[in-house]
Image (tube, rainbow, N blue to C red):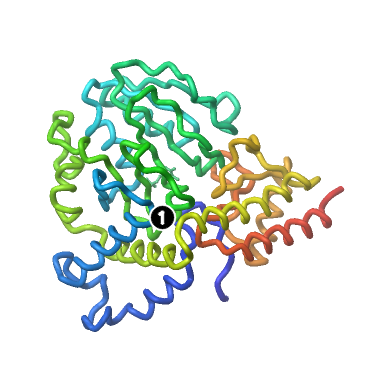
Amino acid sequence: MGRVYNFSAGPAVLPEEVLKEAADEMLDYKGTGMSVMEMSHRSKAFDTIIKEAEADLRELLNIPDNYKVLFLQGGAHMMFAQVPLNLMKNRKAAYIVTGQWAKKAYAEAQKYGEAVKVASSEDKTFSYIPDCSDLQIDDDVDYVYICENNTIYGTKFKELPNTKGKDLVSDVSSCFLSEPVDVSKYAVMYGGAQKNIGPAGVVIAIIREDLITDDVLPGTPTMLKWKTQADADSLYNTPPCYGIYICGKVFKWLKKQGGLEVMKERNEKKAKILYDYLDSSKLFKGTVEPASRSLMNVPFVTGDADLDAKFIAEATAAGFVNLKGHRSVGGMRASIYNAMPIEGVAALVEFMKKFEKENLK
Ligand SMILES: *Cc1c(COP(=O)(O)O)cnc(C)c1O
């Protein structure tokens, strides 16, 4: 079997070009006679890999000089703890709960202090982003936390919340590098690589320098203190070397495509193909309020669980894979990250049209 159209939410599709390049370099990376998997993280070759990866990421996102870039491990889940451990000086933080991931981060923060839920969209199964223009943000909170793109529910903040001057922490796992952003509006932005950037095992954190200090909660493990990682340029211990190498290749691929402006245009075009069809279909419908729709994760249903299952089975057989919705919500979800070509989305819509014709009663 050849390559399929992979709509997985994560680990997810990567650019074919990147995979081919990695394959070419598998046995002998640039004349070193070894794979990147086999080389010391202290070697000259790896030093170049990680430095170039950081430089390219800085260029793509236009990251200001007063921000550090850290390549970490432990997934987004580990960040759910690292954020309060490193930032909760007053032991109080505001959380905007717009889905499972924000909910988990909020629950984790409660272990360390008072996490205040200042807004939520749980009343309508997280199908929208609440109005965050004038929330009650207490003066003594250390930060305001959001999950910017809700991978499971398919919603996205189109506007950042008004934090009333407090530091904003954002989980951008599933929208990382999908469009240009103004990094200076964030105190911390972080994301697991396995959604839109690279293989699982790497988490990238972009942190304003003044927040990287020794003043962390008592008992914070050495490894989870950002200063440990920042002082060592992400090489305090053995980093996820191979993952970082692939992320670096994806950054170069993004630069070659024309950068994040081009990706944004392309992502909008891709998502529009799918949403326009969902809006016109008599069989399928999107589950998210139009104003909150994600460009990356598109959930939809037929309203009949058996028909959903039939659709997923037939789509899989036709080479459109991983369309099953998250186990907590059911239905379908097409994740259409940077590396999903526009042809993949167009072909999926054609397949959905055919299925609609055959199954509409
Ligand atoms: C996938 C995902 C997570 C969880 O990531 P892990 O790497 O499994 O910890 C957290 N937040 C968002 C937005 C995600 O998409």
Q: Is mark 1 within 8 Å of ligand 1?
A: yes
Q: Which residue sits at x=70%, y=54%?
A: 311
Q: Which residue sits at x=35%, y=24%?
A: 165
Q: Which residue sits at x=27%, y=50%?
A: 69
Is 93 in front, or is 99? Answer: 93
Is 319 in front, or is 93? Answer: 93
Q: Relative to 200, is 152 on the left or the right? A: right
Q: Residue furthest right?
A: 361
Q: Which residue sits at x=35%, y=37%?
A: 186
Quarter in which the N terminus is drawn: bottom right
Q: Position of residue 319 (x, y in %)?
A: 63, 66
Q: Position of residue 170 (x, y in %)?
A: 38, 38
Name the residue beneath numbered marker 1.
194
Report ligand 1 position as a quadrant. top left
Q: Quadrant of residue 110?
A: top left
Crowding near pointer 1: few (<14 within 10 Å), some, many (20+)?
Answer: many
